[in-house]
Image (spheres, rainbow, N blue to C red):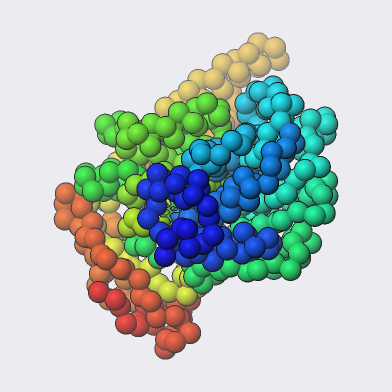
Amino acid sequence: MPFTALGLGPKITKAVREAGYEEPTPIQTKAIPAILEGRDVIGVAQTGTGKTAAFVLPMLEKMQTRGPSRCMRALVIAPTRELVVQIEENVQAYGRHLHLKYKTIYGGVGEQPQIDALRRGVDFVVATPGRLMDLMGRNFVDFKDIEFVVLDEADRMLDMGFLPSIRKIVAKLPKTRQTLLFSATLSKDIEGIAKDFLKDPVIVQIGARATPAELVSQQVIEVSKAAKADLLIHLLKDKALEMVLVFSRTKHGADKIARKLAAAGITTATLHSNRTQGQRMLALKKFRSGEVRCLIATDIAARGIDVEKISHVVNFDFPPQPEDYVHRIGRTGRAHAIGDAISFVAPDEIADLRQLERFLGRGIPRTKVEGFDARASEVAAAESAAKYNAVNQGARRQSDGGRREGQAHRTGGRPGSGRPAPSRDGGNARRFDRPQGRPAAASTTSSRDGRPAQTSAPSSGRLEKRTNPFDATPWKNRQSRPSSGRSGGPGGRRRP
Ligand code: AMP
């Protein structure tokens, strides 16, 4: 179906053609006519489905046909700065043949250009809730001409605690307006805010609730924590992993992974909230252009990253929340590309994996990486930790001695007569004499049901690619459920 069949005019369809889109995606086919008709819409779609164009295209179409105004007419609220910038890039591209003014409003950058733009008059604003509230509080924002408001990635905004701000913002908007809400999941909370903010909405749902993008093939590699970095370096020997987004649970962890990859000669950048806005934009730019091969990110910072051609997403740390998994893997396989998601799962993350599998209603195949010596990595990690602890203990003994010496001078006691200070790691240094954790991942035949793993990788680090690794049989149609962990498992039919 062509874009013109959805009711979009020549200027918008020209821009869409120039963006290289040949036909609308399913969410666009369903949402665009409803929005053009003037309906409020709840769009349940993951990122990567083309949801941004699904709301931006009809909004621009309607805005160009109603004359100009000096005040803000369209407001999109999104959870992160990165997503705001990305949405605005799309608005610029789709609206390039229109005479409308667009502006982003978000924190972490100077506010004056944003204030100046609001004063001069701007038609279309994309904003994060925090900075917008700030500028509203100082009367720089005039909502009287608002025709459209969009809450994008509403589920994430709720998770991030933005609901009170959103309520305050929506309370200031004119009652006669069109409201669009997009969310990857349709939870009770989302239904609640939809009831408060939307009028008689049309629900446009793509696929099942919160299932990962269909085009992303997924696999799990069971590996001890200590061996994860080496495993990643091993996998990166495969040139097929050309543009890799790596997720770390913490900012500190992200920096650590980046250092290890850099030491192995792999170009990396990091994206997390300890980095300035400028550093984050630069990291994204380098990743997009291919200057760096790996981008190491935390969940919040990676939210909404739209980088075309991400070849692989690696969950270095497995996400405790199934929704985060869905968002993470949605970074690859965007639009019509095939992407791969590889999850490293340490023994203490197995429970989170099981929870995800119950959430998805299907199992994720375990992969065996041949030629990777996890045991050697564990031993090396243990040795380096022991060395670190020994150096630390030595330094501490010295400083304790010094302290005690100082005390002795003051109290007249004998230097060094105190009991040895307990080590700061509670005596854990000894723990590293022998590596802990699971045996090497290379030796695990780790399909959950104990059958041989489906996939193996030769020593080049190459993972065997499958066209569709899902076991598509819903759990409810199977003999046993995944939570049992011992029996059952993904016992159903497997697609080739
Ligand atoms: P989104 O879900 O809005 O984050 O979009 C994901 C990606 O799909 C973006 O890179 C868009 O440029 C791209 N995209 C959106 N609509 C289409 C389309 N109809 N055909 C091809 N790519 C699209």
Classify 182 as above or below 232.
below
Q: Position of residue 342 (x, y in %)?
A: 35, 56
Q: Position of residue 291 (x, y in %)?
A: 32, 31
Residue in view at x 46 percent, y 58 percent: 3
In this figure, what is the number of numbered marks? 0
Whether residue 191 sits left or right of residue 170 in the image: it is left
As rendered, which of 183 and 317 lies closer to the eye?
Answer: 183
Classify 436 as above or below 207.
above
Classify 287 as above or below 220.
above
Q: Position of residue 469 (x, y in %)?
A: 31, 68
As rendered, which of 189 and 127 lies closer to the eye?
Answer: 127
Residue in view at x 61 percent, y 64 percent: 34
In which quarter of the view is residue 292 placed?
Answer: top left
Q: Position of residue 74 (x, y in %)?
A: 68, 45
Classify 272 as above or below 35.
above
In which quarter of the view is residue 485 placed?
Answer: bottom left
Whether residue 165 is visible here, answered yes or no, is no
Quadrant location of the C terminus?
bottom left
Whether residue 245 sits left or right of residue 166 in the image: it is left
Residue in view at x 54 percent, y 66 percent: 30
Quadrant location of the N terminus?
bottom left
Residue furthest toward the left?
459
